[in-house]
Structures are given as C-alpha cells and as structure tokens.
Amino acid sequence: MFFIMHLSMNRIFHFLLALCLAVSVNAYDGSQLWLRYTPNATPSALVAGKKSQALHELRTYYHGTKPVRLVQKKSLPPEAYEIQVEPKRITVVGADVNGLLYGAFELLRMQQLGHIHSTRQQPVFSLRLLNHWDNLDGSIERGYAGKSIFWGEERGGEEIQDKRLEIKDKVTSGSKHNSYPLINLSKIDAYARANASIGINGIVLNNVNASPKMLTSEYLRQVSTISRRLQAYGIKTYLSVNFGSPKALGDLSTADPLDPQVRQWWRSKVDEIYRLMPHFGGFLVKANSEGQPGPADYQRTHADGANMLADALQPHGGIVMWRCFVYGANHKGVDRVKQAVLEFQPLDGQFRPNVILQTKNGPLDFQPREPYSPIFDQIRHTPNMVELQITQEYTGQSRHLVYLAPMWKEFFSFVQPSSLAGIAGVANVGDDANWCGHHFSQANWYAFGRLAWNPQLTSAEIAREWLQQTFTTDEAFVRPMTDVMLASREACVDYMMPLGLHHLFKFDHHYGPEPDGFKADYPLEWCPVYYHQADSAGIGFDRSHTGTDATAQYREPYRSLYDHVETCPEQFLLWFHHVPWNHRMQSGRTLWQELNAHYDRGVAEAERFCTVWQQMRPFVLKADQGDPRRWQEVDERLRHQEENAREWRDTCLRYFGSFAEPK
Ligand code: GCU
C-alpha cells in the first residue's frame, strides 16, 4: 500500500514538475530585452568578414537572403559605421571593431523593424557611459531591480558555494579559496551585449559612494575578469574611487592630494590597474559631498584632488570624471541649487586636460522636472559631462511607467550636446529576470543609449522602435503605447510636483509624498518644507534677485526670463518664485486652481494608462505566445501607479489647501 502510494506520489510529482517546466519554457519574463531575435539553426553562410563579435551576431541572427559583407575602413570617424544596401548585397562598413559591431546591431534592428536601408552613422558623444551605483555587498544604491550583477556577499576567504554564481573564470579564480565572490559571467556577457546593441562604450562598475576596498588587489582581479568580458563588446571599464583610499586602507596616515607619498600611492595603484587591464578607462569621483572624503578635508581644492588622480592616470591614457554634485560642505546655508557653481566656477581653467566635470542635468537632484543646471553655462574651460538618472529614484522607481526620454530631450533643448564631452546614465539594472524591475523601465535604458548615440532622435522615434522590438510591430499596439509613453513623464510631474515644485518626497526613500516633511535633525536641504515654502501668502522658492538670486547663474536669455514672475515659464514658476495663491495664470485660473488642475490631470492620465493597457492585452499575449505574465506584471504596476497618483494628489492638495483654501 505504502509502495503504491509512494509510486503515485512520485508520478504526481513528476507530472507537476513537467508542467512547471512547460510553463516556464513558455513564460516570457522579459529577459531578452529589445533583442528578441530568433537564432538561425546553423550560422548563416551569407555573412562574410573577419572573425569578430559583429560577425558572430550577424551569422547567428541575420535572416535575409542577400549576402552581407563586413568591412573595416579606418578613414571613417571612430566608432562610425555605414550600411550600404545594394541590389545584390549589403555591406556593413565599420571604422573599427566598435563601428562594425554597432553596424551589425543596426542591421539587426532594421531587420526587426522590417525595413533595411542604407545609412551612415557616427556617435555624437564619444563617452557614452553607464554608472552603476552597485555596492560590493551586492546591494544597489537607488536600485529597484534586485541585486548587483557584478558584486555579491563578501565571503572573507571561504569557499564559494552559491549556485547563482556558478561560472568560474579560469584566469582569476583558479584558487579554491577566493576572498571575493564569483560572478555569473554569462549574465555579464548578456549585459555587455545589450549595451553594445545601443552603443554604450563605458561602464563604471561601482557606487559613487565608493568603498575603499574596491581598490584592493583581490577586488581588482575581479574587476579585470569583468573588464575582459565587457571589452569583448567594445566597452571600457571604469571605477568609482574613494578619495580617502590611501588612508582608509591603512597604507598611509593621510590622503592629502599634495602629499608626495599620497601621489605615489595613487601612481602605483593606477599602474597596478593598468597592468591587469590595459584598456581600463579611468575613475569617477564623488568628493566632499554627502559625507564622502575629499581634498577639502586637507584644505585643498577640487582641482588639487582631481589633478592628482589625473596625473596618475595620464601616462596610461585614463580620465577622471569628477562629480559636481556637491552641497553642504563649503557653502553651508547657501541655496543648495547654487552651490555647485559657487564651488567649481572659480576653479574653471585649473583642471588637467584629462579631467571632465560630471554634473547632473538639474541643479538639485534628478527631480521629475528641474531647470537645467547652470554649471553648463558657467564652466567654459573644462570639459563637461552630463549625468542623467536612468534608475527612477524620484520618478516612481520600478513601480511607475515613466518614460524619461522627453525629460532628457528637454535638457538638450537648453544645453547643446556638442558642448559636452560625454554622457553618463545612472543604471537601472539588477539581477531581476527582466533586468529593470518594470518591463517599461527597460525603455529608459534603451532610450539612454540611443540618445547617447544620437540626441537628435525624437522621444517618439525611440519609443516606437523600442515597443516594436520588445513587444510587437502591430500598429494597433505601437500607436497607443507610444502615446502612453510620451505622456507618462508629464503625468508624473503633474501628479507629483507640478509648476516647478520639487523635492516633496518622503524622507530618504524618495517614493511617496511628504509635503509637510520637516525634521529639525535633517539637514535643511532634505526637507520638503524648505523647498516649497508654502505659507498663507503663497507657495514657491524665491530664487530671483529678491531671493537667493540663483537666476543670476544662468546665461541670457534664461537669466532674465527666469528672474521675473511674468516671464518665467509656468513649468518652472515655483522653482524660481514665491507666488501668491491668487496669482493669475495663463489659463485665467488662479495659482491654487491651476495647481488643482495639474494634480487632477496627472491622476486622470494614470487612469488612462490603465485603460489603454487593458486594451493591449490581446497584443501582448500574442507576442508572448499566450503567456499572460508580462501583461499582468505591467497591469499590476499600472494600477499601483494609479493609486499612488491619487495619494500624491490628495496628500499634497490637502496640505497646501490648509494655506490656500481661504483665497
Ligand atoms: C542622491 C541620491 C543618493 C546618491 C546621490 C549622488 O542624493 O539620493 O543616493 O548617492 O544622489 O548622486 O551622489
């Protein structure tokens, strides 16, 4: 009896297992991103060229009937490519290996979109970087899609037994006892490939709040393993470094950038890095900001600090990306949005040629809408790079559908791409099956890469091609969803903080609303009440000449436009002015009524996104062979977004109404 029962239990178990496997084979989890190419059964014999990653991609995924040749032509600008479509053949011409690879991916993109044509492309920015805010313990600062794909738990020399970290790298992990974790290299290959497909050519592997341990020899060996995998896809490796490393690691008693021993320490460290990785790109540094060490600890300037690192990197061709996100250190009590210019403008001209200043798009901190950062007007003798945030720290994280291309395009309407040396995006990638948490957050990663290649592309073009490759080319899906994506950023601004309001977020986690947020023990710069300044007279932060005079940091015509209530664009009104509740807006409504209208519109948009998605169900199910997983995951998030939008509106209007209602 027991035997029979055991047997049938066994059968049931196997049946269930088979069922699970069948389901999981069909279930599409989003892991292929926009690269949903069907591989050929055998490599296509129609593709010819020298052995390269580009050749491999095309042999595996090109389905056309015309032969394709891959040719390298050094006279093209770096990383550029041409696709020449002739009646009997296609030629992909690349300036170098990167150009060939980008050309190959362009051809595959055209194949997916159903229209192969001749084109000639070269990147607008030569530095197109992702910044990972990944910590060595595997957590990710402002990450909403699981754990780091680069780093794991520290295991202090024990043998590694984590199944997740199954693949060993022969060169660096020969020994049985590693004091650093092994990593899933196939995941890193897939990651590198996805980045190459959108033209990313550099990756910073760790958090700007950098652990000094990053520079220990053990970790550097792991960096070198990763860097070789990235290099195969034309991607350079960079590291964030902790300025205090020589001291923090116990090697020296100081990290003073003018101390000869400190300078020597960095030179030797950099030499060690380049011995391991001849293609290493350089350092990203957050110094004297939010508690990080920096040259000011030794009464030295940012230029002293950056130049010391630049001197160590220069012989190897490396660069320093020095962040301008500083506040609260040397200009305590001054309007936070003014501090970066005050700090860096006097140093302009003092930096070595291989230093680039890296600044966030807005002067505060990745808010749903900010005016551009005036540092781009004030720094004229040092190369600038813009830092955009792909991970949605302040735009609903991985719970809200907010397509960020329109925000980045807005920035480029104020700051000429040609004036910038490069572009960096804070990555939104973790070890979640779909990489980004929200299926639609993949679009932000994609859009960042496409804009880094060509900032002239429109938000709509990028949304369309992403939707077509990621879901389906059916216009009945692509059209309404392009519309949803394009409307989503403005909706987010409307339901969170319209008309120039900013930083109304709950303390620290930056997700929900807390307009009454004030705790005496916070630095003032983290309190919503400091930013909106609502009182019975009105609302908004006076940054005009009658207030903190932040408007004076802008070039004309913006300086004058922003300085006066009458000419300030309404989308920035409360950023620059404290405005009476009964102020007449362009619509004829009072400010209070207008605020209500914006919040209502934001909520109505979030509701509309849900409705449209309901109608999209058949298309997504068809694209996913009947599997509802992806559709459901998005649906669940859209409902959550709608709920959150209401919460934002109700909380903010209730609070502001306590000042405004009587007017
Ligand atoms: C924001 C963010 C921090 C981050 C910082 C930075 O303040 O909340 O987590 O470290 O930006 O960009 O350095």
Image: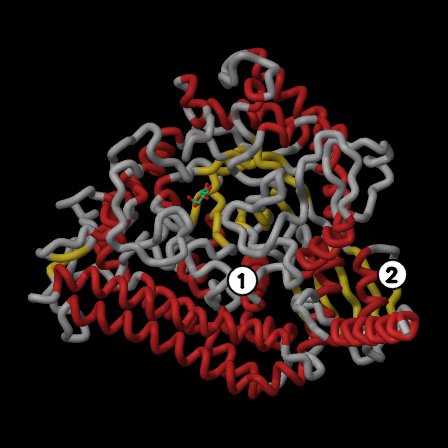
Left or right of 455: which side holds 213? Answer: right
Tell me, yes or no, if residue 460 can be seen here. Answer: yes
Q: Is residue 532 above or below residue 108?
A: above
| Scheme of colours in the image | secondary structure
Q: Residues within 10 Å of mark 2 (few under 14, many from 20)?
A: some
> Split into 4 quadrants, where in the image is the C terminus?
bottom left
Determine whether the beta carbon of the residue marked 2 sits less than 8 angstroms from the nearest atom of ligand 1. Answer: no
> In front: 209, or 159?
159
For the point 86% across and 35% down, which residue is it? 174
> Split into 4 quadrants, where in the image is the N terminus?
bottom right
> Which structural element holds mark 2?
loop
> In front: 214, or 85?
214
Q: Residues within 10 Å of mark 1 (few under 14, many from 20)?
A: many
Q: Amino acid at mark 1?
A: Asn
For the point 66% across and 56% down, which residue is it? 195
Tell me, yes or no, if residue 40 can be seen here. Answer: no
Q: Is residue 251 above or below residue 530?
A: above
Where, by quadrant of the figure, is residue 512 drawn? Answer: bottom left
Give the residue at mark 1: 444
Residue 216 in the image, given as x and y percentages of width and height? 67, 26
Residue 540 in the image, given as x and y percentages of width and height? 20, 54
Where, by quadrant of the figure, is residue 279 drawn? Answer: top right
Q: Which mark is residue 49?
A: 2
Q: Is residue 328 above or below residue 145?
A: above
Can you tell me which quadrant of the image ligand 1 is in? top left
Report the residue that reaches farthest toward the front: 1
Q: Which mark is residue 254?
A: none
Q: Disc 2 or 1, which lies upstream in sequence?
A: 2
Determine whether the beta carbon of the residue marked 1 sits less than 8 angstroms from the nearest atom of ligand 1. Answer: no
For the point 75% across and 75% down, which residue is it? 23
> Which structural element holds mark 1?
helix
